[in-house]
Amino acid sequence: MGQAESAAGCYTQLACLSQEKQQSLARDRFLLLAAASACRAGWADLGADCHRVLTSLAPHHQATRFSTVADGLRNEEYAALVKHWERFCPLERAEMLLSELDLSPDGGVEETELAEWLHARLRACFADVLQKEETQP
């Protein structure tokens, strides 16, 4: 598994865990990192949903200025924000946080199924937000 895929796995799971613990600041940071990592891994659907959840739950976040994660990553300020939070919680630290909870970045699924599994996990954690977004005009 590549670094971007592993990072997407870690950050998506940490975003879900932060949501479950009602830790909105951590959730928003992990959603930003999950979106960027998913985009880098070529998982556009996962990245788009991470972005949608983030911009819905944090309407004043810098990410709301961009319609997609890819657009954001092409902007210097947005890319700098992602780098800042990647320094705050590098992949190694994210993996350690998950291992302390007896979780793995890949959720125990095959690499070929990881993107689908992560997307399902994100949709389950943020079902209310994503459903609300889908029903709005």
Image: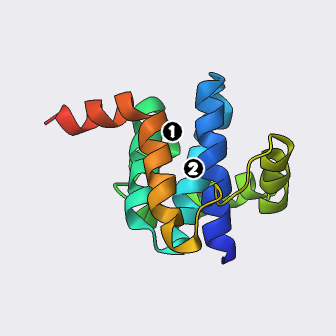
User: CA–CA distance between discs 1 and 2?
Assistant: 10 Å
- Figure coloring: rainbow
Say left or right for 96 vs 55.
right
Residue 75 shows up from this direction: no
For residue 1, above or below residue 39: below
Q: Amino acid at mark 2?
A: Leu
Residue at the (66%, 25%) spot, across then down: 23
Nearer mark to the viewer, of 1 and 2: 2
For residue 136, above or below residue 119: above
The quadrant of the image that shows the N terminus is bottom right
> So how many labels did they put on this image?
2
> Residue furthest toward the bottom?
2
* Sequence-first tag of 1 and 2: 2
Q: Which residue is mark 1?
A: 61
Q: Helix or strand or loop: what does disc 2 sit on? A: helix
Q: Position of residue 53 (x, y in %)?
A: 43, 40
In this view, the residue in front, 120 or 5, is 120
Say left or right for 36 vs 70.
right
Q: Amino acid at mark 1?
A: His
Q: Which residue is mark 2?
A: 32
For residue 20, above or below residue 38: above
- Are the residues tagged 1 and 2 within 8 Å (C-beta)? yes
